[in-house]
Image: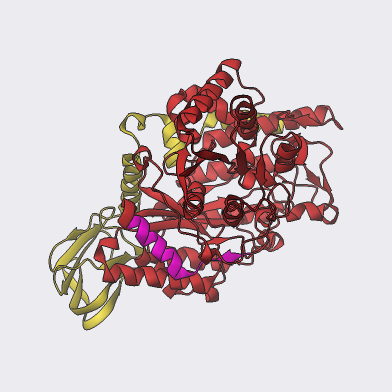
Chain colours: A red, B yellow
């Protein structure tokens, strides 16, 4: 019996298993492969000390340049030893999953160690493959791997059908060793993810990831999702409910987290999904504990009627992660968010009525944000205080101030907005830009606004997670901003990467 | 003005809302009953209903109430809760207690954990002042 080993790279959530590997396991199973899972992410989280894990995370996410030799050796030893244990005479492929840009560094290391120690063909894929190699190396990571001959097969884009074709011997399928992937048209035709090869007892939460759609129906100026999935596609509602039921009956899973960029991209399909889940719960009361959460887009009230919220409540919607971004109409209009302040009020009112908590994601200092827009933010924080008290705004996250990412639509508006990035404080993106069309919006001003918002939110009792981490980054930005003022025209990087 | 709503997926044979012992709304064969009233706090709210043994949705001033957080006492044929001037604060504090209960016991007391996972008690005034100094000087 042929065998394939799937490797999950850090750092991703350790409390529940990788959804990507679960669906790829299904693909392999359908091709008569047995599957072994090597959750390197989870193994490292258990083996490394807290300080080592933090050091590793900081290096992997580009905040820190160096790993100590000792830690690197430990990472290598774990990788080689665990993988060696999993390899059998039947193993045909080792397949490595690179979840995002923030796994590229460890992926490059792992491929090097693999090449030194093993000879079984290696496949690598995942979102990170199609991103830049690093902040200072704009070569697409997958191309870098091919050029360096670090893997036998590099899979660009979505992996399910491509892996299926590769396992069937079709190594010329688009997306294999060439950055020309074909986007999957019908998500409902993909196999149902299987967790039979995972040791589910190792995961703390009885929760798994589920995919209802890929891509987005918006083209928000600050977001690069269009790079990964140019078009929005969704699964049939019945298909999603069937998958939830399967995982409930097979593994007792009651918590589902959607991987979608937005769970209500198709209002009608989302409505149908909630309706079906409610019906299933009525028919099979044992399904009642099932709950779900996901990213959500606030929509105009006429598109998201009260019945939708009522169904979400009865279906078990336990949390929405909602990209509000700004409480200013004009800022959101420029962002192309397509909803108004009245729509936000309506959304909150409905969520309060149906007990649906939200995590609001916000951006301070968008390029068009004026002092007046900032005042809109402060006024809304005061206006919506009761929603924070009663848990409708379960948490709010204000981030590090607006930073500019490559491959986002706003980078095509640089001329229009008069954006200057010459004085470049760069982390994984550019923080220190200025705008000729909105000259008051300097990095210092953005930090000032961010601090004002922080103080007001704390005063009014808004839960805000990871504030210390965010403030420390803001402090670093403030220090660099001061350096920039004394040394104009120089580029200052928060990190130097190869 | 205050607003109390009680709703159920199936029809109530009868439902009555009492505030401080006084009947403020009643109806038969409905799924929803709303009472608007203008009483001073504290409010002792009792809602009687049939059929017995159900767990209806309860809203106070348009917020769906979690039974545990709002200290709603549910009996076979009625439910009761009290709204004092501290109602919202008490509700929130209990919510925070619930969030803390999800953390590992040994983690609960550290400031870092409260910040990271619950998002409270995190003004960090020294850090904030140092940032302010950097951007104003």
Given residues A376 and A223, the one toward you in this image is A223
Residue at left offset 46%, top offset 36%: B115
The quadrant of the picture occupied by the N terminus of chain B is bottom left
Residue at left offset 66%, top offset 39%: A152
What x and y, as percent, mark residue A208?
Answer: 42, 50
Kindly report the secondary structure that dominates the magenta region of the rendered protein. Answer: helix
Q: Is residue A319 visible?
A: no
Can residue A254 be found in the magenta stretch?
no
What x and y, as percent, mark residue A6?
Answer: 51, 41
The span picked out in magenta is A232-248
- Tag count: 0
Given residues A284 and B110, the one toward you in this image is A284
Q: Is residue B21 visible?
A: yes
Q: Is residue A371 above or below residue A66?
A: below
In the image: residue B75, left or right of residue A249: left
Residue at left offset 44%, top offset 56%: A293
Residue found farthest to the bottom: B29
Q: Is residue A296 above or below residue A498?
A: below
Q: Is residue A49 above or below residue A419?
A: above
What x and y, as percent, mark residue A57?
Answer: 56, 30
In the image: residue A173, left or right of residue A296: right
């Amino acid at each position: 019996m042929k065998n394939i080993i799937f490797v999950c790279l850090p750092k991703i959530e350790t409390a529940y298993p990788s959804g990507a590997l679960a669906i790829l396991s299904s693909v392999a199973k359908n091709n008569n492969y047995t599957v072994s899972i090597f959750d390197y992410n989870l193994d490292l989280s258990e083996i490394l000390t807290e300080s080592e894990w933090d050091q590793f995370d900081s290096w992997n996410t580009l905040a820190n340049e160096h790993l100590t030799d000792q830690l690197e050796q430990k990472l290598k030893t774990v990788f080689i030893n665990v993988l060696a244990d999993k390899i059998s005479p039947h193993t045909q492929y080792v397949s490595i999953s690179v979840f995002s840009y923030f796994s590229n560094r460890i992926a490059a290391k792992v491929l090097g160690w693999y090449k030194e120690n093993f000879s079984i063909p290696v496949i690598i894929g995942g979102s990170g493959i199609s991103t830049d190699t690093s902040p200072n190396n704009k070569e697409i990571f997958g191309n870098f791997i091919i050029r360096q001959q670090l893997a036998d097969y590099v899979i660009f884009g979505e992996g399910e059908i491509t892996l299926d074709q590769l396992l069937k011997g079709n190594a010329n399928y688009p997306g294999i060793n060439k950055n020309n992937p074909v986007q999957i048209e019908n998500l409902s035709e993909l196999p149902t993810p299987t967790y039979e090869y995972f040791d589910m007892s190792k995961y703390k939460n009885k929760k798994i990831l589920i995919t209802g759609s890929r891509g987005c129906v918006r083209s928000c100026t600050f977001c690069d999702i269009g790079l990964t999935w140019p078009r929005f596609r969704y699964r049939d509602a019945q298909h999603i409910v069937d998958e939830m039921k399967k995982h409930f009956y097979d593994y007792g899973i009651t918590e589902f987290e959607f991987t979608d960029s937005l769970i209500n991209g198709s209002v009608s399909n989302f409505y149908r999904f909630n309706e079906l889940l409610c019906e299933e719960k009525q028919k099979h009361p044992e399904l009642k504990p099932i709950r779900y959460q996901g990213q959500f887009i606030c929509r105009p009230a006429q598109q998201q009627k009260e019945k939708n919220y009522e169904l979400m409540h009865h279906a078990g919607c336990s949390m929405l992660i909602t990209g509000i971004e700004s409480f200013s109409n004009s800022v959101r209009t420029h962002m192309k968010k397509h909803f108004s302040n009245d729509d936000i009020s309506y959304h909150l009112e409905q969520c309060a009525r149906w007990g649906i908590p939200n995590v609001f994601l916000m951006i301070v200092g968008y390029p068009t944000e004026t002092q007046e827009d900032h005042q809109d933010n402060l006024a809304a924080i005061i206006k919506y205080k009761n929603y924070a008290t009663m848990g409708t705004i379960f948490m709010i996250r204000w981030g590090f101030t607006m930073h500019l990412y490559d491959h986002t639509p706003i980078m095509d508006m640089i001329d229009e907005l008069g954006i200057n990035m010459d004085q470049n404080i760069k982390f994984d993106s550019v923080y220190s830009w200025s705008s000729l069309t909105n000259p008051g919006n300097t990095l210092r001003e953005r930090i000032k606004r961010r601090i004002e918002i922080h103080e007001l939110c704390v005063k009014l009792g808004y839960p805000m997670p990871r504030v210390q981490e965010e403030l420390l980054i803001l402090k670093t930005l403030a220090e660099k901003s001061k350096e920039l003022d004394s040394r104009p025209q120089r580029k200052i990087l928060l990190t130097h990467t190869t | 003005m205050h607003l109390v709503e009680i709703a159920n997926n199936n029809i109530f044979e009868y439902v009555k809302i009492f505030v401080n012992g006084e009947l403020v709304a009643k109806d038969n064969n409905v799924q929803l009953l709303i009472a608007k009233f203008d009483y001073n706090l504290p409010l002792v709210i009792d809602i009687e209903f049939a059929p017995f043994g159900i767990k209806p949705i309860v809203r106070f001033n348009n917020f769906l109430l979690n039974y545990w957080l709002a200290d709603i006492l549910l009996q076979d044929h009625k439910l009761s809760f009290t709204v004092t001037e501290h109602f919202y604060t008490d509700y929130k504090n209990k919510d925070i207690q619930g969030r803390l209960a999800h953390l590992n016991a040994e983690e609960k007391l550290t400031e870092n954990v409260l910040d990271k996972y619950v998002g409270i008690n995190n003004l960090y005034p020294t850090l904030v002042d140092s940032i302010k100094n950097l951007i104003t000087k």
